[in-house]
Every structure is written in structure tokens, then in C-alpha cells.
Amino acid sequence: MKAYFSKLMTTGFEETIQIVTEILKEQGFGIITEIDVKETFKKKIDVNFRPYKILGACNPNFAFKALSKDDKVGIMLPCNVIVQQHENGEVEVMIVNPEISVKALKNPALEDFACEVSGVMRKVIARL
């Protein structure tokens, strides 16, 4: 099992961010953090980098369920979604696989829950 789900897009970088954000919203997720890696690298270390954003997606109901089962699961939140434009111009979306990330906590109470959230993330990727 892979640590992430991914899909190459036929849309541009900014349009892909809008599309993935809307599909996540339809599944009850909002974007609570957005890290513009390209901008940060330029500003902090004066390095040019390709378009690359890390979106922190959160579904409050899922987050509450997870934290109710294990207070340490917050280290895995929010669910990271990467949108990056490769050197060849292709735009890729990658979403963390919660089933893999919660294994590090070794808490069986999280397994079914992580499977449920992974199912939602698979739906997001399928809709792209």
C-alpha cells in the first residue's frame, strides 16, 4: 500500500488547486493551511523553485473522531495535499494515505477510522 494517492492533471497549476479544493469541500474538508513552497524558498533562501503548494485539508468531524480515539493523532493532522508542477509542465496532485500515516501510532482503534478517511481521499482523487 502506498503512502499517498496521486493523479496527473490536464489543467494548469492554479486551476488544479481550485478544483482539488472544491472537491475536498464537497467531501467536508476545508483548507486550513496553505504553504507556497516556491514563494517561501524565494523569500527565505533566494532559490527559484517550481510551483509547489502544500494544502492542509481538515474535516472537523473526522478530526474530532480521531482525536477522541488518540490524542497523539494530531501529529498527523491536517491531511496534506500537494499540488506541484513538474519541470516538464505536468501538474500532479498527491494526497496522504491516512491508513499508512496512522500505523506509526500503533493504535488499533484508529485503523477503521483511517480506512474510512482513506476511502474519502480515494474518492477525491477519482473525481479529479
Image: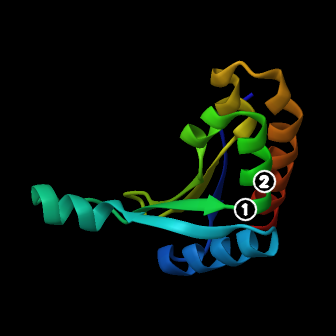
Residue 101: image location, x then y, percent:
65, 32
Residue sitting at the far left: 46
Q: CA distance from mark 1 to mark 2?
A: 5 Å
Q: Amino acid at mark 1?
A: Asn
Q: Between residue 72 and residue 7, name the one nearer to us.
A: 72
Residue 32 visible (yes or no): yes
**Contact check, label 1 and label 2, Cβ < 8 Å:** yes
Determine the residue positioned at 79% across, 59% down. Answer: 61
Residue tagged 1: 59
Q: Label 1: few (<14), some or many (≥20) within 10 Å? A: some
Name the secondary structure under disc 1: loop
Q: Is residue 120 above or below residue 24?
A: above
Q: Amino acid at mark 2?
A: Phe
Residue 124: image location, x then y, percent:
77, 62
Q: Between residue 64 and residue 111, name the one nearer to us.
A: 64
Rendering quarter of residue 43:
bottom left
Residue 2's tag is none
Determine the residue positioned at 74% across, 73% down. Answer: 23
Determine the residue positioned at 69% across, 31% down. Answer: 102
Residue 59: image location, x then y, percent:
72, 62
Residue tagged 2: 62
Rendering quarter of residue 89:
bottom left
Name the secondary structure under disc 2: helix
Q: Between residue 43 and residue 88, name the one nearer to us.
A: 43
Where's the C terminus, which quadrant?
bottom right
Q: Label 2: few (<14), some or many (≥20) within 10 Å? A: some
Left or right of residue 32: residue 3: right
- Total label count? 2
Residue 48 visible (yes or no): no
Residue 99: image location, x then y, percent:
75, 34
Q: Is residue 111 above or below residue 14?
A: above
Left or right of residue 9: residue 35: left
